[in-house]
Image (cartoon, helix red, strand yellow):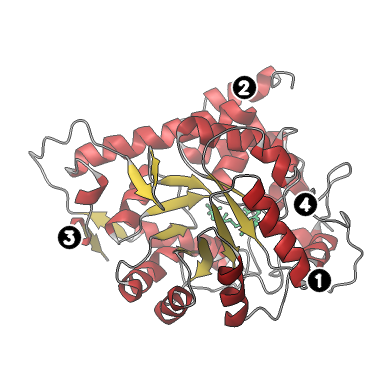
């Protein structure tokens, strides 16, 4: 691919924090694409709430802890990662940059973290697998027809994906009013590369063309038996994404989930849903260390990552910030953004008095 135009490269280089990538991306993306990425459901209360929840915590830091060279390394599912941050699955990344998912995956791979590929990607499972060698997880929306789901899982196994991330908080697409207002649909020239009928007809309901497409490819009647069915049919660990309650967490683990993601889909599904960070302690308590618990939603700072880990998360996923970094700088943009976040985590660990992630505990936090 040709190099990014100079204004994009400059925008990426001038970013001092993750939020700077958002303003830089806004300047280069069409308004409707920016709104699709940035927006949430209805009043966007959950979208804001995810951020507000982080701000309610303060650190009770330790001093004289000799934490000048903190170790950010962590292990999940037997894989070693260089930091506890991974890339969340998000749809149609070629909306943000021509190289789309391949560029983002290359950045994750170079940074030593995992990349989650959405079912609704704009490059195929096989194309993305060929782009890099780092750890890749496949995010699954279960299709109304089980044969289609079985085919997805088989392709992910064959293409060397290390886990299936089953998203369970989208029986139907949430009401995203920015998209309705913009009559947002798949931009010309892009398609759902994994789906057989790449532009499914508007057979399903939904308030805008994009939601109709998504709804045609997800199963609104998904139940616990479907999770058991999936676990029984895949050799890969199944991570359930979209849990916000302890009882659901326990049920998912009983059904065979090997990991959980506490998530409200970045505030894009049920509005007024509990903030991810506020849901975390209940889920961690219910699971009792049986499986790793990850969190996503509103993670924008190294201190946010540390707060989630203090409350028992094994790691976090980030969504929007890497789409903005992808828009402004492709692979280099995402790499730069990840290095910024890594530096923030390392410095904050030093100031907090934590030498490794295992030293992070609730005792280091207070909430008001
Ligand atoms: C998403 N998310 C998402 N999740 C999923 O399981 N499959 C998907 O295809 C998508 N698509 C998607 C598109 C866009 C544009 C966004 C912003 C998000 C949700 C995503 O995985 C994650 O839960 C949130 O993005 C996390 O919140 P932050 O980091 O964006 O605040």
In this rendered view, identify the residue nearer to me: 191 or 270: 191
Using the image, determine if residue 234 lies above or below residue 306. Answer: below
Q: Quadrant of residue 253?
A: bottom left
Mark 1–mark 2 Cα distance, whole angstroms, equals 37 Å
Which is more foreground, mark 4 or mark 3? 4
Classify mark 2: residues with Cα within 10 Å, few (<14), some (14-19) or many (20+): some
Give the SS element for disc 2: helix
Distance from the alpha carbon under mark 4 to that under mark 3: 45 Å
- Residue wearing tag 1: 206
Give the number of the mark in front: 3 or 2: 3
Marking on residue 194: 4
What residue would you read off at disc 3? 363
Point out the image quarter for the N terminus.
top right
Viewer-closest of 139 and 95: 139
Single out the mark in the foreground, 2 or 4: 4
Ligand 1 found in image quarter: bottom right
SS class, disc 4: loop
Give 142 or 326, whichever is nearer the viewer.
Answer: 142
**Distance in Å between CA atoms under marks 2 and 4:** 31 Å
In this view, which residue lies farthest toward the left?
Answer: 64
Sequence-wise, the earlier of marks 3 and 2 is: 2
> Under 8 Å from ligand 1: the CB of mark 1?
no
């Amino acid at each position: 691919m040709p190099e990014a135009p100079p204004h994009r490269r400059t925008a990426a280089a001038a970013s001092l924090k993750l939020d700077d990538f958002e303003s830089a991306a806004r300047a280069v993306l069409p308004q409707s694409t920016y709104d699709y990425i940035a927006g949430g459901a209805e009043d966007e209360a959950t979208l804001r709430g995810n951020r507000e929840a982080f701000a309610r915590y303060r650190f009770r830091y330790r001093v004289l802890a000799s934490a000048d060279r903190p170790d950010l390394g962590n292990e999940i599912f037997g894989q070693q990662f260089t930091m506890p941050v991974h890339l969340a699955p998000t749809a149609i990344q070629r909306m943000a940059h021509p190289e789309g998912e391949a560029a983002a995956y290359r950045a994750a791979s170079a940074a030593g973290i995992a990349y989650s590929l959405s079912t609704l990607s704009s490059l195929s499972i096989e194309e993305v697998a060929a782009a890099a060698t780092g750890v890749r997880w496949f995010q699954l929306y279960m299709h109304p027809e089980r044969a289609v789901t079985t085919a997805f899982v088989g392709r992910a196994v064959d293409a060397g994906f290390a886990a299936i991330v089953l998203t369970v908080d989208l029986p139907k697409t949430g009401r995203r009013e920015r998209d309705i207002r913009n009559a947002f649909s798949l931009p010309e020239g892009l398609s759902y590369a994994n789906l057989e009928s790449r532009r499914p007809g508007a057979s399903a309901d939904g308030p805008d063309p994009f939601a109709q497409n998504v709804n045609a490819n997800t199963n609104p009647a998904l139940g616990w038996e479907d999770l058991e069915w999936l676990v029984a049919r895949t050799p890969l660990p199944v991570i359930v994404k979209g849990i916000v309650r302890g009882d659901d967490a326990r049920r998912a683990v009983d059904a065979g989930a090997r990991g959980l993601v506490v998530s409200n889909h970045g505030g894009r599904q049920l509005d007024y849903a509990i903030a991810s960070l506020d849901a975390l302690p209940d889920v961690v308590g219910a699971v009792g260390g049986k499986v790793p618990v990850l969190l996503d939603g509103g993670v924008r700072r190294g201190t946010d990552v540390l707060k989630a880990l203090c409350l028992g998360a094994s790691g976090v996923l980030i969504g929007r910030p890497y789409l903005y970094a992808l828009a402004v700088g492709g692979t280099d943009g995402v790499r730069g953004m990840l290095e910024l976040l890594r530096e923030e985590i390392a410095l904050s660990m030093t100031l907090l008095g934590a030498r490794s992630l295992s030293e992070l505990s609730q005792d280091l936090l207070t909430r008001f």
